[in-house]
Amino acid sequence: MGFLKLALIVAVVVGVAKGIQLFNYHCRHRFGHTFFTMRGFWLTAVAVNLIWWGLYFWAKATQQHAPTSDGLILIALGLAATVWLLYENIRDTDLLHGIGGSSLQLALFFPLAVCSFPLLVVAMVVMVVSSYKAGPALFIDR
């Protein structure tokens, strides 16, 4: 029974992946627009992270009895980025394909966008530290 469940899960995952590839292929040939590009990922990542961190700061502010406006501003900026993503996809395709492709982008890029933000922050800190050019302490004391 376990083998049958595993085979069913693998079949569903492969079927969904193939369906997404066919949808992207169809949109590329019909409209000349590809949904799953690096630009689409970054726009989705910005929208998702702004909404995610906005909700976090909003919840923290209500727990600490602080003003919630910072979180609400981040949420509004994230929703604006989401609306822009929808606008671009609908402009380049039609209404049905644009909404379907945008929802697929948000659903598929969400885990990667949330997990990649802390890694991005760590990479930025490493780059700042590695580019810092200070002389050794021996030369400062002279």
Image (cartoon, rainbow, N blue to C red):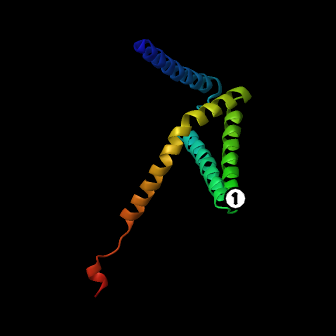
Q: x, y (%) of residue 22? A: 56, 20
Quarter of the view holding residue 129: bottom left
Q: Residue at x 60, y 31 (%)?
A: 104
Residue that protrudes farthest toward the left in the picture: 138
Left or right side of 43 for 91:
right
Across and down, in percent, residue 86 comes to 69, 38
Q: 30 or 40: nearer the eye?
A: 40
Q: Is residue 36 visible?
A: no
Secondary structure state at the residue bearing disc 1: loop
In this rendering, is residue 120 above or below 2? Answer: below
Give how far across and how far down residue 62 sits, in percent. 67, 57
Amino acid type at mark 1: Thr
- Expressed as whole percent of the image width and height from the top left, the position of residue 79 reads 69, 46
Circle 1 crowding by C-alpha within 10 Å: few under 14, some 14–19, many from 20: some
Q: Residue at x 69, y 56 (%)?
A: 73
- Residue pushed farthest right? 95
Tell me what residue is drawn at x 64 percent, y 61 percent: 64
Which residue corresponds to mark 1? 68
